[in-house]
Amino acid sequence: MATLESACQYADDVVSGEVVAGKWVIQACKRFLKDLETHTFDVEKAQRILDFFPDFIRHVKGKLAGQPYELSDWEAFILINLFGFVDENGKRRFRTAYVEVARKNSKSTFCSGIALFMTAFDMEGGAEVYSAATTRDQARIVFGDAQNMVSKSAPLKKVFGVHKLNIHHMKSASKFEPLSSDAQTLDGLNIHCGIMDEVHAHKTREVWDVVETATGAREQPLILAITTAGFNKQGIGYEQREYVSKVLDGVVDDDTYFGIIFTIDEDDDPFDESVWVKANPNLGRSKKLDDMQRLAKKAQEMPAARNNFLTKHLNVWVNAETAWLDMVRWEKLPERGSVEHLKTLPCYIGMDLANKLDVAAVVAAFPDSNKIHFLCKFYLPENTIFAKSRTIGNMYDTWAKQGYLTLTDGDIIDHEYIEQDIREMLNHFDVQAVGFDPWGSTQMSIRLAEEGAPMVEIPQTVKNLSESMKEVEAKVISGELHKDKNPMMDWMASNIVVKLDRNENYFPNKEHPDNKIDGMVALFMAVNRILTDDGISLDDFLSDSITIEGF
């Protein structure tokens, strides 16, 4: 049974290494121990929430259904942070909390208990508590657990009235309800507590912004986001996660924001059973070891299952459910050789210029014995940069300022910028072939060909890309791909998902229009020329191009 003493001891044990924990949990515990010396901690309020759970809350599922909810030390640690620390007025210090933990660690039941406490036991008249999500079904998970808790707890039956979509406390005129973006209206809310379940699934900021704005009239509101990791790194969930990591690292000073992230560390082997507890603090209780072993075996045998295992059970964020590359390996790839070294090697260039309104990419690949070096260049019309989502626009703006992205004038890609860069590559490197997709780049390719550039048409088909994708994948696994130091290319590599046909041929794809992959496609085109090195003659190319254009 968790107590105030055991919750504090948990922090000591994590910091000392007696309890196995990841980086962010260690940081959260260090923050707590430091805050005990510098902030006001109300022992009575902390004890009150700890007593509430076993006294009032009952398990609603599994073999423990109907039994008192005995808090784990890590759960008690979160609660004493949220409810024990107060400001100079004696009001709750933390107004926003972000808790990230893998599946099957009782987070929905935990949240339901907090919601019921906030409805009737937080000394707030007319409290409005909501389980908020993007869909009705998701919003009802925490709310539904709370309904079952009331039905299984005699003390709670005396406190609450329950209707289909409403739990109310008559004495204080308070209520707890599910809330979703597809509700008839999100106006007029006066929120005391908003439970944001599985915030990783929120594709927009709509619900978050509504809840955040609607807490303004309350003296000590609480927004609690609790989630597993996900696949959308451009969403509000990952935005909050990134903010929390900065708070825990001490980069951002925010005394009102509590955060804790249960996940494995970057250098951990995801198939090492000893690290699983970092993401699963309830391992051996609600999370079964044999289930983890079964899922890990499946992830090892089936690449498509790997990312699901990483996100849902080890709390590792990835960009797509069926992501192709092992990004841990990608990130560890050696950096490409110097320009002077690349000048001694044959050069093969790939261009992906399909959409004049969006990102264009040029990648030069250099075979070097068993290794392949590459360098990359990206282009985007300057006037379209903030026509994207705010997050994507900010990313592009940052990369442009850092020199990783060239912004061309106007609303469409100015191919003169790209032509000039190709000409510079032709002057500096031993260029064997410049591969291009005829869609969107024929005119530029004709001009370059007339100047003597070895242009080779490479339509973006399974036939042309499958083997080069497999070659790139093999080079990533072996560490023989030496990459350009470019965060935009790293991002595109993480966006690649693979379509497999019945013959297990590869074709690159993406799960969302904003998840660009142009740089990787250009790399595949360049590697295609390395593998084949049998392009058509210049005369043939010019003849074919003229036919295509109808001259």
Image (cartoon, helix red, strand yellow):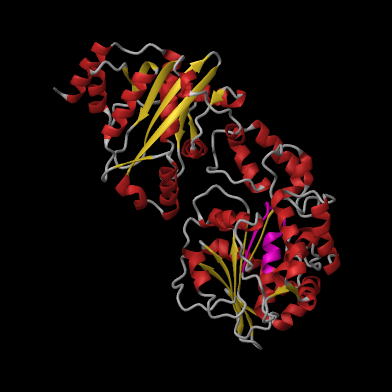
Residue 306 at x, y percent in the picture: 62, 38
Q: Residue at x 47, y 58 (%)?
A: 204
Tell me which corner region of the image, top left, top right, bottom left or bottom right, holds residue 261.
bottom right
- Residue sitting farthest toward the bottom: 171
Q: Position of residue 198 (x, y in %)?
A: 59, 58
> Viewer-proximal residue, 187 or 265?
265
If the image is split into quadrants, where does the N terminus sit?
A: bottom right
Percent position (x, y) of residue 153?
76, 74
| Residue 215 seen in render | yes
Quarter of the rendering containing residue 515: top left
Image quadrant holding the C terminus, namely top left
Looking at the picture, does residue 30 appear above or below residue 487? below
Q: Is residue 297 above or below residue 83?
A: above
Q: Residue furthest front?
A: 340
Residue at the location (41% across, 48% down)? 397
Q: Nearer the viewer, residue 55 or 148?
A: 55
Segment tinted magenta in the rendering: 96-112
Image location (x, y in percent) of residue 511: 46, 42
Residue 342 as seen in the image, left or right of residue 58: left
- On screen, residue 76 versus residue 491, left or right, reads right
Answer whether residue 104 is magenta in the image.
yes
Residue 503 in view here = no
Q: Quadrant of residue 520?
A: top left
What residue lies at 66% left-to-right and 57% top-to-bottom? 248
| Count of numbered tags | 0
Q: Is residue 113 magenta?
A: no
The residue lying furthest to the left in this view is 551
Q: Nearer the viewer, residue 257 or 49?
A: 257
